[in-house]
Image (cartoon, rainbow, N blue to C red):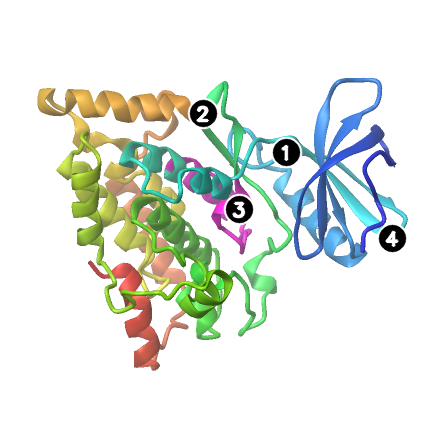
Amino acid sequence: MCDVQTGHFLMGSQGLYQVGKFLGRGSYGRVAECTKMGSNETFAIKIVDYLRAGSEEMEAMKIIRSLNPDQNNLIKIHECFQYKDYMCLVYEMLDESLEDFMGKRSFHPAHLCQIRAIAQQMLVALSGLESINVLHGDIKPDNIMFVDQITNPLKLKLIDFGLAVNPQELNIGTQMQINPFRAPEVILGLPLDVSIDMWSLAVDDLLHYGNQPGWRLNTPSEYSEATGEVVKGLNEIPDLDAMAEFHHDTFPLYEEDDHRAFLDLLRSMLAIDPRQRMTPSLALAHDFITMNHLSGERKASYAASAKHAMREAGIKDMEERFPTTFSDVVSVREMREEERCDHMSMTDTKTICYLSLYSSG
């Protein structure tokens, strides 16, 4: 039990912080909103119960510091220090999580223009991590946060690097990621690389796109135990095309080509074989992200809405920031695949069929 309470003071190397309200609790500690004395600055301080866990996250953040946190949509760390038997990591203060945002909407589907803005920012984050060979290992709505919903309503950052690691340091069979976001190679105990994050991000995108069941990320039995309600329709698993039809009936502003592009991207990110799974850099050059398919007078109104959502996320000058063509990135990807060893030998047919429910349309 953490004995740091509201009103306590924490002394860091860059200043004295007073603990305000606690924002949440994770498996290793709590996060508190703290005020830096002598200023009006507020920070989110993660107070980790175990020094080893805190030290591991601190080391991960030291590596990630080589990336520009604002340009790569990663949370910014200011300092870290030890307080008694706790490790304190001082992060920038952000807004609410994507999980909380979805909850306020009763987990109803988001418009595809919003999903694109979310996906693009997280792909930039994963592309940055890939460039330094770091996998996040815990991509989920809880770990994606809005920066400031007043100034930039859709601007997001990736947080919580407690499990971030160079994949070369992982032993075969390492278990990571929570069940709903767990890549098939993790389940099967195969060698892992940064592509497991792409699987998790695709599942996150799918959560925004589909009409989610009431039991959501729990098992039906867990949901029934918690609510007393009987879960129905377990055999009625919609495919991606059925989800597209639901969007067509839900949103008045609908563009079939955009949904086709999104489903193409999603299927590529949900490839069972990680060697065939789309990389972040390749995904950033996909039509769904670049919006190359939204040209023409007929699509002008829809394209304007799509660009507006991107501006709300603080994304400007797409062509200038991501000029690489799809074919250019494909050629790079093919070169990379020639260098990779063939570790993928899936013999568990039942597992493959189960996982294919997410990737088959």
Nearer the viewer's eye, disc 1 or disc 3? 3
Nearer the viewer's eye, disc 2 or disc 1? 2
C-alpha distance separating marks 2 and 1:
19 Å
> Which region shows up in magenta?
120-144
- The tag earlier along the polypeptide, 3 or 4, is 4
Q: Which mark is residue 85?
A: 4
Q: Which mark is residue 342?
A: none
* Tag 4 and tag 2, C-beta contact below 8 Å: no
Quadrant housing the C terminus:
bottom left
**Relative horizontal placement of residue 146, taking residue 259 as reference (left or right):** right
Q: Position of residue 67 (x, y in %)?
A: 58, 36
- The tag earlier along the polypeptide, 1 or 3, is 1
Nearer the viewer's eye, disc 4 or disc 2? 2
Alpha-carbon neighbours of circle 2 within 10 Å: few (<14), some, or many (≥20)?
some
Residue for badge 3: 142
Residue farthest to the right, as pictured: 84
Q: Position of residue 313 (x, y in %)?
A: 42, 26
Residue for badge 2: 153
* Tag 3 and tag 4, C-beta contact below 8 Å: no
C-alpha distance separating marks 3 and 4:
26 Å
Tell me the element at label 3. Answer: helix
Please, is residue 182 above or below residue 138 in the view? Answer: below
**Residue at the spot x=38%, y=71% of the render?**
342
Residue for badge 1: 76
C-alpha distance separating marks 3 and 2:
17 Å
